[in-house]
Image (cartoon, rainbow, N blue to C red):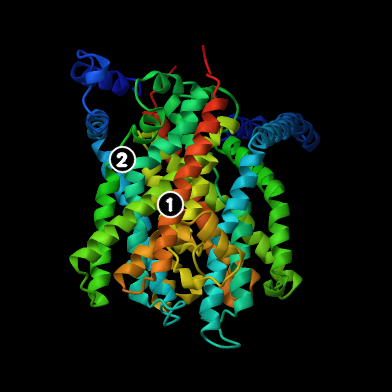
Amino acid sequence: MSREPKVENRETNAPASAPPSLDSRPSMLGRYAGIYAALWKNSVTRETMFKGNFLLWIVVELAWFALQLGFISVLYLHTQHIGSWTKWQVVLLVGVSHFIQQLFQAFFLINCANLSELVRTGKMDFLMMLPVNTRFVASLRQVDLGGFVNAGSALAVMIYAARELQLSPTLPMAVGFLALCFIGICIHYCLMFSLASVSFWTVKAQGIVHGYYNLFNIARMPDDAFPRGVFKTVFTFALPVLLVSNVPARLLTDRLTSSSCFLLVGMAIACAFFSEWVWRMSLKRYTSASS
Amino acid sequence: MSPYGLGGKWSATPLSFARDGWNASDVQRIKLCFHVPLLSLIYVGFFSVRKYWHVIGIGVQNNLTYRFNFLARTVFGFIPLTAILLLWRNIYEGKGDAASVATFTLAQMTSYYLLVTLVDALTAVNEDDWQIAADIKDGNISQFLLKPVDYLWFRFCLYLAGRGTYLTVAFIPLVLVTIYLRDYFVLPPDAATFGLFMMSVLMTAMLQFFISYTMAMLAFWVMEVSTFIFILYAFEYIASGHMFPLAILPQVVQDILFFTPFPYQLYLPVGIYLGKITGAALVNGLLAQAGWVVGAYLLARFAWFRGIKKYAAAGG
């Protein structure tokens, strides 16, 4: 089943790009957009095959999201604020975190998780043979459509919390917020992709997805809750998950300092370079399995 | 449901041999004869236990393959643990010295999460439910319908082996963290409390296993069981006290929760250890836990019994 989409990609894209000589191909961006559209089409087809399961996974995610919100409301039965964060600010933060996590899940999570399987079974060969960037197909092969529905539920919670806080974000603020979320998703992706690349060494790397879920847990915690120390330093400067949702949430609640904003952008760039470096190192280690 | 089906058949026969006119010693001798099947039953029973010991041995070996996975899991697991402990410390600091949240002091709260980690390492079902579901889907259970091995106890042995291995690997990091947090770690009030804690942990393990086993039985009816398992797990996660001690919930919610099996899957042993559950509540809690263990066991047996009727032995 997993081989079908690739074959189809080539068929849908080859007629558009192959007949003219190599030099007169449509622009690189257009070509990749076409390929990505084909990947989307495959994912939609795949999801429609198991409709009941698709709906049940949405229920699972909703249950876990409700659980996080329940935890916050129980905590605030016993305290007025955590650091400088009030109850509805934290609800907003949990919403932002879920929004970012679900979009990350929609685009990248399955693919990162499947990387070790591709290496173990040697199916990576097929991806490497395709006339496209291998990291591109490996990272974006499947789209998890449920993630978009769940991101919608996160958006609803964010809007509710914003009303409770009597926030009225302006258009530039909303655009800035979305841009920061985009950067956050990139950070999650780069970190997880680097971790998943470890599977080129250890082969069985299923613990990695589990490990990364622990980092999501930290992303939804208010940054002020942690005193200056090893923990905060590591999760700000080494694995910057503490920045990912705190910075956008602070933008919405009008408490963002420009330094933390620049830090987020800087860390995103650093993570991108790091993950590319790890990926290239890992590819060198690849020895095909089977056959 | 004895795997041999011998029990009922043999034990009924002796009475029919007692005839009129036989003297007492004859009857004694006849009875003696019937000790043979009884003894052989015990003998077979002994060996059946022995074969389950073999299963445990195999389970340990299989699990040792994943020792680094276990270690990574334990160490990764300390990240959210640290986060939540820091979060609570922040909340307690805002309240001033000698503060308590629903009778929990900061030290007790810290101990609570450490104990939850420990009990979780001792009792949490790792991948058993996925494996059982996969066995059913792939038709691997067919062999257990033919062999004199009871699938439930077979899986229980593998589960025990998994927990044993996990604990051996997780023990060192757990002890290190406890030593690091020694100022915040409280000991049980007395030895008896510790004994009751251990007893409750044992029942927790059984309850966890039987519930997971029952959930995995869903694989007889549906293709994909993971969604159902995850939904139940979400409820378990909050209602068993994994996220926070149930005592910080409003009283009404607590009362309702104690009618469900969830608090008995984690909160009860930890509450006993910390001396939060005492006296009549403790006795009632243990009785209820035992009740849930038996209930979950019967449900597991029932689900298997119904499932087998529907089973189509996929894959031959």
View extreme (bottom): residue:
B97
Three-letter amino acid code of the residue under disc 2 = Asp
Label 2 neighbourhood size at 10 Å, few (<14), some (14-19), many (20+)?
many
Return the residue nearer the eye: A159 or B216.
Answer: A159
Pointer 1: residues within 10 angstroms few (<14), some, or many (20+)? many
Judging from the image, mark 1 belongs to the subunit labelled A
Residue A245 image position (x, y, % from top left):
39, 61
Q: Vertical placement of A170 versus A153: above or below?
A: below
Which residue in the protein does label 2 denote? A144
- Please tell me which of labels 2 and 1 falls first in the chain: 2
Same subunit, tags 2 and 1: yes
The percent position of residue A196, horizontal first and vertical second, equals: 50, 38
Q: Amino acid at mark 1?
A: Ala
In terms of image quadrants, where is residue A129?
top left
Which element is circle 2 on? loop
Give me the disc on residue A94. none
- Residue at image point 34% right, 20% down: A131
Q: On screen, A290 above or below A251?
A: above
Residues marked 2 and 1 touching at CB (< 8 Å): no
* Distance in Å between CA atoms under marks 2 and 1: 23 Å
Vertical placement of residue B112 versus B2, above or below: below
Q: Name the residue rendered at 50%, 43% in the picture.
A: A274
Residue A4 placement, left or right of B219: left
Residue under label 1: A268
Q: Residue at x 68, y 57 (%)?
A: B174
Give the SS element for disc 1.
helix
Figure check: B152 above or below B179: above
Inspect this view and state whether residue B299 appears: no
Q: Is residue A240 left or right of residue A153?
A: right
Q: Position of residue A9 (x, y in %)?
A: 26, 22
